[in-house]
Image (cartoon, grey):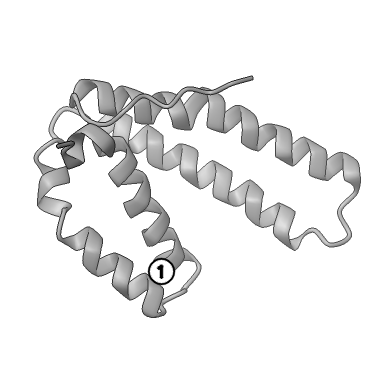
Amino acid sequence: MKTLESIYGIGDVLEKMFILEHKIVIKKQKNEDCAAEQTELSGIKEYVNQYKIGLADLISGLFSAHHQIWERESELRQGKDMSDEDAGRLAKEIRVINDTLRIPFRNKINELTNTGIVEQKVI
């Protein structure tokens, strides 16, 4: 039987926590779905905390990459009058941040904690 660690790595769980924090704190989106997800994630916080020692820079980098992606996605969503050129530029920036920062940070966290699977990107 597969364990939580073999399917979802610490990096994956951290991403879920960052996304939920973004929804609740930054977007002020506190609804039933967020509350249910928060309850589920709170049950595994101790599990994640045991791995945080020595990973602070990687965790900070992962959070920063998410924040950069969220900023650009927000621009895209709000850009009703945005030119195709600007939308294309933002989409490319999101792809670059995702491919060069977010995924490598998450994979490295999973590798160092020997948890989860390594996400493979096909280009």
Q: Work out whether residue 26 or residue 10 is closer to the camera in this orientation and state it.
A: 10
At a point 60% along the width and 50% down the height, the residue shown is 71
Residue that badge 1 annotates: 24
Q: Amino acid at mark 1?
A: Ile
State whether residue 46 is above or below residue 78.
above
State whether residue 99 is above or below residue 14.
above
Residue 28: x percent and y percent? Answer: 46, 73
Q: Is residue 112 left or right of residue 117?
A: left
Q: Quadrant of residue 69?
A: top right
Total numbered labels placed on residues in the image: 1
Residue 68: x percent and y percent? Answer: 55, 42
Q: Quadrant of residue 62?
A: top left
The residue positioned farthest toward the bottom in the image shown? 32
At a point 89% along the width and 60% down the height, the residue shown is 81
Q: Work out whether residue 119 or residue 77 is closer to the camera in this orientation and state it.
A: 119
Q: Secondary structure at mark 1?
A: helix
Q: Quadrant of residue 8?
A: top left
At a point 16% along the width and 53% down the height, the residue shown is 45
Q: Work out whether residue 33 or residue 24 is closer to the camera in this orientation and state it.
A: 33
Q: Would you call the spot at circle 1 few (<14 residues within 10 Å), some (14-19), or many (20 or more)?
A: some
State whether residue 97 is above or below residue 31.
above
